[in-house]
Amino acid sequence: MKHFHNDKLDLWKSYPRQGLRGFINSIVRIPAFSQSDFRKLAQANVQVVFCALHPPEQKMSISSMYYAHPASMLRKMVETLAGRITSVAYRKINEYFQSTTYDHYSQLKYEIKQLLKSSEQNDCFSKVKINGTTKRCSYHLVKNATEIHDILEKNKQFPEQLTIAVVLTVEGLHALGRGHINFNGYRNPRNVKDNEILYRLDLVKGVGEAGDPVWNYTPIWVNLTHMFSNSICGHAQGFNLFFRMVLEYAEPFGPLFGQQSRVGLNQGITPLGEKVIKRLLGIDSDSKQRKARNEATGKRILIDIKHMSTQSRMDYYALLDQYQQEHPEDSIPIVMSHAAVNGKKSVYDEPDPVDSEIEYDRSGGFNPWSINLYDDEIVRIHQSKGLIGLIFSERILAGGEKLRYLKNQLRKGDTVQDKGLYAYFRKSRNRFKWTRLILDQIYHIVNTVMQSQNVPGSTKSKVWDIICIGSDFDGQITPIGPYKSVKAFPVFKQTLLEMLCKDTRFEPLKRGFSEEELVDKICFKNAYLFLNRNFK
């Protein structure tokens, strides 16, 4: 949430106001305002939300080619502009990216502390008008699926109130104390040793000795990596050419249009990463020994494969395959929480992908980069009873040529000289055209599993159980068309329903489900049932 990076701790208020920031963001097309504050969630009648804790990575820094001296005017201008684009306070820009004392782990604890502070105060609520009715709204961090069920039942029993269940996740394990800059060539003490990382993992899982600051609210899943090297696993290319030119990530670059030589890019899982994965899943030797002694092993935390390089994902699948072969009774679901597909057949075809701007720019279909899902990964997620959360980022959903064609079609429509209700119909038309980006993703996921020779016919219809919404709102994305924030979710749901009813591609794929049932699965039920199975 943008609030954490500005010390604006009333999570019910939209932040920030527009003005100059809004003008700048209309150019770069990244919303300045909070897309998923609790007021907007309540207005959209969202009752369960995944909240990603994410300390900003210190290795993101403005390239030194834009300034030479820390006190230079140009540097201040660039950092101020960065703050305007990202809605991060100027002083926070300096604290995160330039301070020798900034600590990812301290920031992580700060974020959960602020969430807890607001959640546990009985007087922390807001009156919100929802569908013409004013309701007393609040939110509550949850420890398991049972608490979610109780909140949903309470919302049904007392319709004049609304409580939002908040499920924690963590985006990037740099948050545990890795990935800091080594200033002036000296080792940064905030890059803690391997044993400390594993100790902190235990705390997050709720395990520790008497007096240890164990977490009471364990995340359902974590991303092993994000955009930078963190000594746990390699990451996929995530930013376009512009941001790769402006941001140096405190790491070396290769050719702009070719293979990037950034540290950690396209690398695999490290020895520490393997220990971390096994500890998260509770399948390491220490966890097994604790279990044998009837000691607490903590909750299982799932791995979110988003941002992992193809090599890291292949390494992870190999680890899972070996474990599942030895323990077939213990199924571990695979998750990509804010995802899209790339239309390519196999992740094993690209262990070291180029992910070039030219490839993206020429794509008339999906975004072909390796950060997205390959077809064999879709099948693997289906077989594991996992989850694919569909992202609302236009660049991640579609290739450059496809986006240009779409926007050109929308501009052509704007020249029509119809009067009267034309503006209404134009807005409706645009809504359908943008929603097709999501519908194409759904079709590809479902059709891939239906056509797979590796999936038994009796289980193919269960592909409809693995798709949900993973918008990535407040993640510095360029959202698709009219869906700028969670307030637009009801409109999206209705539009998706109308399009499913008309799209003949889906007729042989529905397998007895009505369009209403399928939309309900995607917009709520699948994520809820996944939590029931895995959030104990």
Image (tube, grey):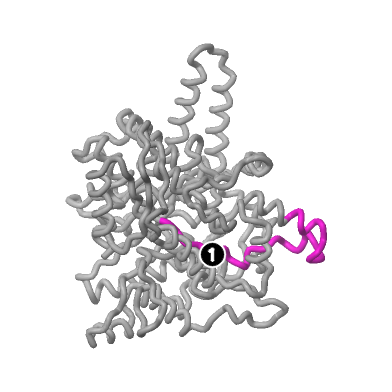
Q: Is residue 411 above or below residue 319?
A: above
Q: Is residue 16 above or below residue 239?
A: above
Q: Residue 147 in the image: x percent, y percent?
A: 27, 58
Q: Is residue 152 left or right of residue 311?
A: left
User: Disc 1 designates what residue?
Assistant: 55
Q: Residue furthest front?
A: 123
Residue 255 seen anywhere in this rendered image of the structure: no
- Residue pictured at 36% horizontal, 56% vertical: 140
Of helix, strand and loop, which one carries label 1?
loop
Residue type for callout 1 = Pro
Q: Residue furthest top?
A: 419
Q: Is residue 483 above or below residue 124?
A: above
489 part of magenta stretch: no
Q: Total label count?
A: 1
What segment is highlighted magenta in the picture? 51-78
Q: Quadrant of the C terminus?
A: bottom left
- Residue pictured at 52% horizontal, 70% vertical: 174
Q: Residue 51 in the image: x percent, y percent?
A: 42, 56
Q: Residue 212 in the image: x percent, y percent?
A: 40, 81
